[in-house]
C-alpha cells in the first residue's frame, strides 16, 4: 500500500458509516417488494422489478464509475454518490403522488447509480487501506454496519408504512427525511479526514522499486488481460444474486405465509450475516485464508439450500434466514481476490466488478418467475447454479494469472 497514513481507525469508522448508508438504501427494496404489490396491484414477478431497477444501475454506471474515481478520487466519488442517491430517493415522492410504478422504478434506478459509485469506492478503499491478506476481514467488519442498517430500513419504513393497510402516500414523508440525511452526510464528508490512497503500481510516476511489487500488472495494456478479475465479475454477479435475493425475498415469503409482522423477517438474514461477518473477522487470515473462507461459505450455502427444499414450509423460512450465515463472507472474499495485483488498473477494475452487481437484478427475476409457476420453496433452487460457479472461482478461477512476456 502506497500511503504514509498508518492509522486507519478514523477512515475505517467513516467508511463504516458509508457501508451503513448502502445497507439502508438496499434494505428499502426488501420492504418495498411486498408493499408495491398491494400499492400498484402488480404480480409477484413484477414486484421484483424493484430490485431489478436498483441493480441494473450497477451495470450501466459500472462502466464509468472507474473513470469518475480516477478523476475525483475515492473521496470525491463518495460525495457524488451521496448526491445521486439523494436525488433518486427524492423522486420517490412524485412517484407516490401520481401512483406511477414506472416513475418509482426510475427513482430507484437513479438511486442505484449513486449506490454503484459508492460501492466501488468504499470496497476498494477498504481492501487497499491495509494488508491484502486481511482485506476480507476488514470488509467483513464493514459488513456488520451494512447489514444492520439493511434491516433498520424495514424497521424505519414500518413506522410510516403499514403492509396490512397499504397507502402509497405513506412513502412521502420518510423519503423526504432520507433525502435530507443523505445531502447532509455528503456535505459533512466533504470535510472528512479521508486520505487518498493508492496501491503499488497504480501511480505511473512512482519509483520503479515500488512499482516492481506489482510485476503481474506491469506491461499490461488492458483490463481484460486479468483473467482472475474477469472471472471475478461473474462471481460477483452470482454473489450479489444470492445475497440480496435472500435479503429481499424473506419478507415477501413471510407475507405469503401470512406470518405476523412480516416486515421483521429480514432481521433473521441480517443477524445471520452479522454472525458470519464476526466469524470472518475472527478467523481470517489467522486460521483460514480468503480462498478457504469463500469455499467453506459456498458449501454451507448449498447444504442449506437443499434443506430449504425438503423441510416443511413453515420451517423453510427460518432456513432462508440461515442462508445469511453462508452468504456473509462471499462478497468480502471475492472482492479483494478479484482486484489483487491490478496495479494502475485498480480503479477501473473495481468499476468492472461493480457492473457484476447486475446479478442482483437478474436472479430475483428468475426467482419470481419460478415462484409464480411452482412455489416459493422450490424457487430457492435457483441458488444452486450460482453456488456451483462460486466454488469454481474459489478453487480455480481466482488463481489464474498470466504474465505478459
Image (tube, helix red, strand yellow):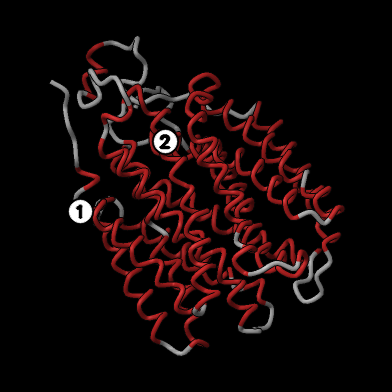
Which residue is identified by label 1? 395
Query: As rendered, which of 23 and 14 lies closer to the eye?
Result: 23
At 49% from the left edge and 48% from the top edge, which residue is drawn? Answer: 358
Quarter of the image with the C terminus in it: top left
At 55% from the left edge and 48% from the top edge, which residue is drawn? Answer: 55
Quarter of the image with the N terminus in it: top left
For label 2, the SS is: helix
For label 1, the SS is: helix
Q: How many marks?
A: 2
Residue 192 in picture, x, y percent from top left: 62, 29
Residue 112 vertical position relative to residue 316 in the rendered view, above or below? above
Q: Is residue 362 visible?
A: yes
Residue 332 in picture, x, y percent from top left: 39, 50
Q: Residue furthest left?
A: 405
Q: Residue furthest front?
A: 373
Q: Residue furthest bottom?
A: 312
At 43% from the left edge and 44% from the top edge, which residue is drawn? Answer: 356
Q: Earlier in the sequence, mark 1 or mark 2?
A: 2
Residue 145 in picture, x, y percent from top left: 55, 53
* Rendered image: mark on residue 352: 2
Q: Is residue 128 left or right of residue 13?
A: left
At 59% from the left edge and 47% from the top edge, which residue is drawn? Answer: 22
Q: Nearer the viewer's eye, disc 1 or disc 2?
A: 2
* Rendered image: mark on residue 269: none
- Tell me which corner region of the image, top left, top right, bottom left or bottom right, holds residue 399: top left
The answer to whether mark 1 and mark 2 are in CB contact below 8 A is no
Amino acid at each position: 500500500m502506497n500511503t504514509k497514513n498508518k492509522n486507519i481507525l478514523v477512515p475505517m469508522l467513516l467508511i463504516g458509516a458509508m457501508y451503513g448508508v448502502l445497507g439502508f438504501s438496499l434494505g428499502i427494496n426488501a420492504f418495498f417488494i411486498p408493499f408495491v404489490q398491494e400499492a400498484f396491484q402488480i404480480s409477484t414477478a413484477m414486484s421484483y422489478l424493484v430490485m431489478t431497477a436498483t441493480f441494473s444501475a450497477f451495470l450501466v454506471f459500472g462502466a464509468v464509475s472507474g473513470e469518475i474515481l480516477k478523476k475525483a478520487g475515492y473521496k470525491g466519488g463518495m460525495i457524488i454518490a451521496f448526491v445521486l442517491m439523494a436525488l433518486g430517493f427524492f423522486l420517490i415522492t412524485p412517484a407516490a403522488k401520481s401512483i406511477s410504478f414506472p416513475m418509482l422504478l426510475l427513482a430507484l434506478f437513479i438511486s442505484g447509480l449513486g449506490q454503484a459509485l459508492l460501492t466501488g469506492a468504499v470496497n476498494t478503499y477498504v481492501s487497499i487501506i491495509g494488508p491484502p491478506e486481511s482485506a476480507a476481514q476488514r470488509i467483513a467488519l464493514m459488513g456488520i454496519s451494512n447489514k444492520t442498517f439493511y434491516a433498520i430500513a424495514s424497521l424505519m419504513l414500518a413506522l410510516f408504512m403499514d403492509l396490512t393497510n397499504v397507502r402509497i402516500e405513506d412513502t412521502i414523508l420518510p423519503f423526504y427525511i432520507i433525502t435530507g440525511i443523505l445531502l447532509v452526510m455528503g456535505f459533512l464528508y466533504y470535510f472528512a479526514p479521508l486520505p487518498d490512497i493508492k496501491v503499488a503500481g497504480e501511480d505511473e510516476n512512482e519509483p520503479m522499486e515500488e512499482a516492481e511489487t506489482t510485476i503481474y500488472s506491469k506491461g499490461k495494456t488492458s483490463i481484460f488481460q486479468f483473467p482472475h478479475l474477469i472471472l471475478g465479475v461473474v462471481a460477483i454477479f452470482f454473489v450479489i444474486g444470492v445475497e440480496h435475493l435472500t435479503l429481499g425475498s424473506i419478507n415477501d415469503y413471510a407475507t405469503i405465509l401470512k406470518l405476523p409482522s412480516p416486515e421483521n423477517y429480514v432481521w433473521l438474514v441480517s443477524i445471520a450475516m452479522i454472525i458470519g461477518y464476526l466469524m470472518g473477522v475472527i478467523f481470517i487470515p489467522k486460521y483460514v485464508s480468503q480462498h478457504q473462507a469463500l469455499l467453506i461459505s459456498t458449501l454451507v450455502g448449498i447444504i442449506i439450500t437443499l434443506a430449504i427444499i425438503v423441510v416443511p414450509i413453515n420451517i423453510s423460512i427460518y432456513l432462508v434466514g440461515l442462508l445469511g450465515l453462508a452468504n456473509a463472507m462471499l462478497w468480502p472474499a471475492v472482492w479483494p481476490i478479484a482486484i489483487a495485483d491490478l496495479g494502475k488498473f485498480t480503479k477501473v477494475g473495481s468499476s468492472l466488478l461493480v457492473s457484476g452487481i447486475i446479478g442482483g437484478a437478474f436472479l430475483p427475476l428468475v426467482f419470481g418467475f419460478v415462484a409464480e409457476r411452482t412455489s416459493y420453496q422450490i424457487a430457492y433452487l435457483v441458488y444452486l447454479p450460482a453456488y456451483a460457479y462460486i466454488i469454481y472461482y474459489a478453487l480455480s478461477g481466482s488463481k489464474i494469472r498470466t504474465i505478459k512476456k
